[in-house]
Amino acid sequence: MDYSQEYKKKVLTASDAAALVKSGDWVDLGMISNIPPLFEQALAKRKEELFDVKVRGGMLLQPLKMIEADPSGEHFVYNSWHLSGIERKYADQGLCHYIPMNYSSQPKFYRDFLTVNIACVCVTPMDKNGYFNLSLTNSSTRAMLEKADIVIVEVHEYLPWACGGQSECIHISQVDHIIEGEHQPFPTLPESQPTAEDEAIAALISPRIKDGSVLQLGIGGTPNAVGKLIAKSDVKDLGMHTEMLCDAYLELFKAGKLTNRSKKFDRYKGVWSFCLGSQELYDWVDHNPGLASCPVDYTNAPKIVAQHDNVVAINNCLEVDLYGQICAETVGTRQISGTGGQLDFLYGAFLSNGGQGFICLSSTYKDKKTGQLRSRIVPTLQQADVVTDPRSHSFYVVTEWGMVNLAGCSAWERAEKIISIAHPQFRDELIKDAEKQGIWRKSARR
């Protein structure tokens, strides 16, 4: 069937697409590779005509023209599902507002609760069957587009075609308007070099991964360090079921470790929801039938994750207190990133037969203002720190000083175990805090 005539009828300029937005509208741009630069730039030029246009996005890799053009936030109100470094700076200026969520819930939020007047996202060029591909960001994009009153796609000539999975494409019959134009290649992430702490933590986790384990690697240096260490090990036939497809999986594949052969379902398929990394990684995604792009209510759903045996989930955090409460997203009232899928995978791994969910952190950090060494293991989370993972869902916690499992532990057991992996310089002080809080056993050794 020839879709060329229908395609031509739906093409319009970015300026004409932006002209569809009215004051007070909710405009959704998706996340990461979804963000449409031509549409967004055209919308920014309409600043003086518009007021209170509420925009949703997330994990920006490039600045938004509409925010740069509207430092008062009077015309555009930007809201993010997960903060990148760029959005963190916007938030510090009061120009970015975080939307709390567990990532697996995002599609249901759109379908059941949110208003979307206009949605515009980047897609690949259309194929011969009339389909556009959502490329590197499946996430909750289809749910968002299904909810939108007006659906606009911006054709991005540099995006790779990601095989499904599910919900990885949208048909031209479901699209109202199409924007064409020239783009820059999609940004890559610079390769992060693991710290000595990352490597020490990776060395503790790596021996616990067995043949056939199904891996979820979160964002950050430690998960990548673990992946690279596994690539050099003797383990084999690993599986992938993850929200983020990162370069560590490519390293595992090139080393012959990632086969997906032993998975209980989706066999021979590496399942993922969004992809961030190198150009080589994006090239690996392109038309690769061994990789399956899926929405986050599939990749991140604990009940789906748990159906695999031997799930290993590895994620970072910022702080852990003596009760086992985990903060991975804020410093006081300052939003740093987001909840994302950490809790989803932590609980999914717990429910998995043989599963292990690791929360990793370096034991200390240097205070940027004073230069002093401070502990990431704290008596209690700071006032206004957000609990990303409640103490009821904290299991394996790992620093460069060791690994403990908090499952089923009472308050005093947790305090003992957590203090044992704190930096030695802070342990005595933490014991005194535990005593004051009534969670240090009187007969415990110092």
Image: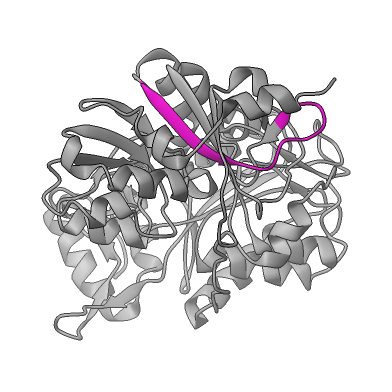
* Above/below status of 174 relative to 412: above
* The magenta stretch spans residue 389: no
> Which is nearer the eye, 425 or 300?
300
Above or below, 381 relative to 163: below
* Quadrant in which the N terminus appears: top right
Q: In the image, which residues are magenta?
A: 116-131
Q: Residue furthest bottom?
A: 371
Residue drawn at x 61%, y 18% as measured from the top left: 174
Is 92 left or right of 238, judged from the image as shown? left
Name which residue lies at 12% across and 42% down.
74
Viewport quadrant of the C terminus = bottom left
User: Percent position (x, y) of residue 172?
Assistant: 66, 24
Q: Quadrant of residue 167?
A: top right
> What residue is at 68 percent from the left and 30 percent from the top?
169
Quadrant housing residue 3: top right
- Is residue 298 left or right of 401 when viewed as pictured? right
Q: Nearer the viewer, residue 143 or 210?
A: 143
Q: Which image quadrant is residue 281 in? A: bottom right
> Which residue is at the front of the view, 242 or 357?
242
Q: Which residue is more in the foreground, 123 or 330?
A: 123
> Is 255 located above or below residue 126 in the figure?
below
The answer to if 123 sits in the magenta stretch is: yes
Residue 422 position in % (x across, y down): 35, 70
Query: Looking at the image, is 434 positioned above or below residue 302?
Result: below
Q: Residue at x 57, y 37 (%)?
A: 350
